Each structure stands twice: as structure tokens, then as C-alpha cells.
Amino acid sequence: MELILLIVFFLIVFSFGFYKAKIKGIIGEKTVSSILHFLNKSDYKIINNVILKKGEFTTQIDHVVISSFGIFVIETKNYKGWILGYENSEYWTQVIYKYKTKFYNPIFQNAGHIRALKNCLKEYGDLEYISIIVFSTKAQIKIDSTIDVINMHRLLSTIKKYSAVNLSEDDKEKIFEKINVSNLIDSFKKQDHINSIKKRIDNREKTIHEKKCPRCGNNLVERKGEFGRFLGCKSYPKCKFTKKLL
């Protein structure tokens, strides 16, 4: 009886942790959606929660903003604590007191989202895609990056700093409609997306194991740097993929 109660207890704790993380993610996305609502409707068109499919793989994008100044692709991370990392490192670190947690570099994650959008919008080859990574106001961001990695309260000012017009009103409308038509959110099955992510990760690890770069397909070579041995793409600096070796 005690064993059964113990198992039930651990299941409850595990489920609570899983759903707590899921709820935090949803809250972060909803908060960013609310902030984006304050953008001028004549200059910016907003689509929240975009699901695109290419072959057998699906991609889930938190927010897409189509504007006269480019396509903003926004990835939301509702994390707190110190956020440490580099633009080209495979993983970043969240530090809360003495506890450290690694998570996949969201710049790389958002680069995949941009590739999916480019595939969806093939007829618009000269579009400017602007990647923005948004953390909660409780995060202290210590990231060395040329990509915008910001707290939520800086989102509107970050978007508005882009002012060079490069998209006509007509094309803006067509792109908005094309993404909406391609968005599979209504028929989306969460488990299918999870399976797609797992398969993509497996394929990526297999490619790295074969000493091939998962980004550009070039060979990976072993190098030694300030923080030890790592695999780097042979086509550096054009491709800056690296993976630390244990």
C-alpha cells in the first residue's frame, strides 16, 4: 500500500512539474501577444501561433509580425534567473541561485522557424527576416549576440527601431494571407508535433555523429579553444556551428 502511495505521489509531482512548465510557456506567449496588440495596425500584421509543415516535419512559431520593414519572427521564453550563453553556442544556461539548467539555443530554434517561413514564402525571395528572442522581465540576460535577445518590456521599441521600408502594402497583404492559409493550427495535433521534434533531433544527432554539419552539410573538424575541444564546421566563418566535446 505504501509503495502504491509513493508511486502516486511521484506521478503527481512529475505531472505538476510538466504542466507548470507548459502553463508558464502559454502565459509567456499570451503576454507577448498582448504587447504586440499595441503595434499600429496599419504598419504591422500579427499572427500568433503559426504551425507550418515541410515534408514530415512541423514547425511551431510563437509570433510572426508582417510589416513594411520586414518579417519579425519572435520566439518567447518565459524563463527567470540569469540567462547565460553565446550566439553560436549550442546550449544556453539558466541559473537560479545554485541551480543550473541547460536549454537549446533559441536563436538556433528561431533560425529553423525562419527557414520554414522562407519555404512557405518561396515566391518572396528578397524578404528581410528579423529574429527576436523574448524573455520574461524576471530574466537577467547575459548573452553575447548580434541577434536581438531582450526582455518583454523592450519588445515594442526593438521592433520599432527597424524603419527602412522594404515591403509594399500589396505584398504585405499577400504574405499575411499566405501564412494564414498555410497555418495548420486548426488541424494541429500536439503529439504529431512532439514526434516531429524528436525525429528532427535524432536526425540532427546522427548527422553530427557522422561528422557532418547539421546546418550546412559541410564536414565537421575537431578544434581546441579556450573552453576545451569542440567540433566546428569546416566552412567557418560562413557557418559558425560548434559542438563541445566531452
Image: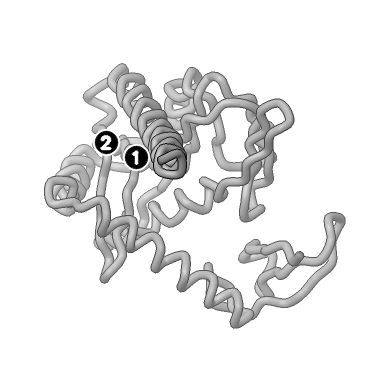
Question: Residue 52, relative to residue 246: is it above or below?
Answer: above
Looking at the picture, the colour scheme in use is one colour
Q: Is the residue under label 1 in contact with that under label 2 (CB below 8 Å)?
A: yes
Quarter of the figure with the N terminus:
top left
Q: Is residue 103 left or right of residue 4?
A: right
Question: Residue 244, relative to residue 154: is it above or below?
Answer: below
| Residue labelled with disc 2 | 48
Q: Is residue 176 left or right of residue 205?
A: left
Amino acid on which the number 2 mark rests in the picture: Asn
Image quarter of residue 30: top left
Q: Is residue 226 left or right of residue 192?
A: right
* Residue 62 numbered mark, or none: 1
Residue 223 in view here: yes
In the image shown, does 15 or 53 lie closer to the viewer?
Answer: 15
Sequence-wise, which precedes: disc 2 or disc 1? 2
Q: Residue 189: percent from the left, percent from the top?
A: 20, 53
Q: Residue 234: percent from the left, percent from the top?
A: 68, 75
Residue 75 in view here: no
Secondary structure at badge 2 equals: strand
